[in-house]
Amino acid sequence: MTPLRRFIMALFFILFLISAGTAGFMIIESWTLNESLYMTFVTISTVGFGEIHPLSPEGRIFMMIFLTVSILTVGFTLTALLSFFFEGHMSKTVKERRMKRILSLIKEHYIICGFGDVGRETAAEFSRKKIPFVIVDNDLPETEKELFSSYVFISGDATEESVLEEARINKAEGLVSCLSTDQQNVYAVLTARQLNGALRIVAKASDERAVKKLETAGADRVILPKQIAGRRLATVSTHPSIVDFLDVLTSGGDELMHIDSVEIGSHSPLTGKSLKESNIGQNTGAIIIGILDSQGRTRMNSSEMASLSSMTLQPGNRLIALGNTEQIMNLQKYIG
């Protein structure tokens, strides 16, 4: 039970106690409303004033019961009152200090702009993969934040420079803009790109016409959730087994096998060698299923007869590898 609910319940008990005490003295002792109300307050406050009139035997029994209930109710009320004014304030202070401490240390993290349906799924995926992130949202109520107490929230407009700076955008690895409108996403992407030119930015678009605007503003990738959902539905309908297999690979839930990407640095010993000459499979156990160029596009061989293994590895290429955790780690070490 929250401090506010305990406080409201305590007020209800006090009002009920006053009403019951007043009614009891009026019925049992035949006192007036003014006399009964006065005696009720004297009893509840336990100030020790004398009785207005001598009590009857029945009145004394009622007084003993009423006094016992009053002491318990007043004790509960004081506890609820202190909890409402101090516990909530202390809890808020502790949370604010925790947020500031995390923000002062966080780096190589992701900033999620907007905590709607897409933002929540993004945060859940980051959390599952133990990727550090900060959420920026201007309209999220405190009750919603309490449901995700392990997340770091910043209340503010994601299109404002000061808010993104508070989220330490200069130390961030990437930004995901999934605000409610395309216009807001364009402004957020534009502001983020100006603050950090090396930031990896992914943005959500509701309309295909907004894709070009977001890319011009500085988004590296633009996602159309409706388009992805439609393609997903079609694929699940026609090739459910393939989708199930890919879900296992991309979800990371199966430690025996998953997909990851590894970048080839400028000083890698594999630079200039073909994939076949690199002997990656023999030395690491990982299987290379694709190669991306420095722009994130899939590399294709100009010859239709040439295989993936004949491609020459270049600095900035990313190898899409299939393997278990140990094999992926071996691949990262092998590439250098």
Image (cartoon, helix red, strand yellow):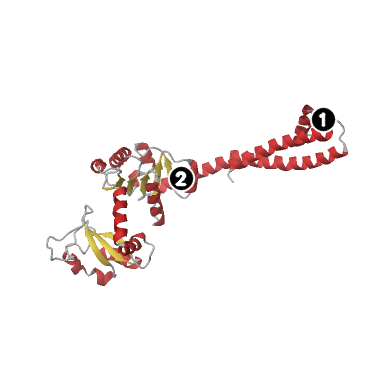
Distance, label 1 to label 2, CA atoms, is: 59 Å
Q: Is residue 46 visible?
A: no
Q: Foreground: 152 or 117?
A: 117
Q: Residue 3's mark?
A: none
| Residue 71 at x, y percent in the picture | 74, 41
Quarter of the picture holding the C terminus: bottom left
Q: How crowded is mark 2: few (under 14 residues within 10 Å), some or many (20 or more)?
A: some
Which of 280 and 135 lies nearest the eye of the viewer? 135
Determine contact: label 1, label 2, CB under 8 Å.
no
Residue flagged by tag 2: what amino acid is it?
A: Met
Identified at 72% across, 34% down, the residue is: 19
**What is the secondary structure assignment of the residue under circle 1?**
loop
Q: Where in the figure is residue 88, as x and y percent of width and height?
A: 56, 41
Residue 84 lies in quadrant? top right
Q: Which of 206 and 216 is in front in this view?
A: 206
Specify the amino acid type for callout 1: Trp
**Residue at 76% across / 33% down in the picture?**
22
261 or 67: nearer the viewer: 67
Outermost residue to the front: 237
Please state which of the two labelled residues, at mark 1 or mark 2, is closer to the viewer.
1
In the image, 274: left or right of 186?
left
Q: Which residue does the numbered mark 2 point to in the structure image? A: 99
The image shows residue 220 at horizontal and vertical percentages of 26, 47
Give the side of residue 149 with respect to residue 81, left or right.
Answer: left
Across and down, in percent, residue 86 comes to 59, 40
Q: Is mark 2 on a helix, strand or loop?
A: helix
Q: Does label 1 or label 2 sit earlier along the sequence?
A: 1
Residue 113 sits in quarter: top left
Q: In the rendered image of this protein, does residue 23 appear above or below residue 245?
A: above
52 to 148, vertically: above or below:
above
Q: Which residue, given by chain and number where applicable, does mark 1 sit on? A: 31
Left or right: 274 as drawn, with respect to 214 = left
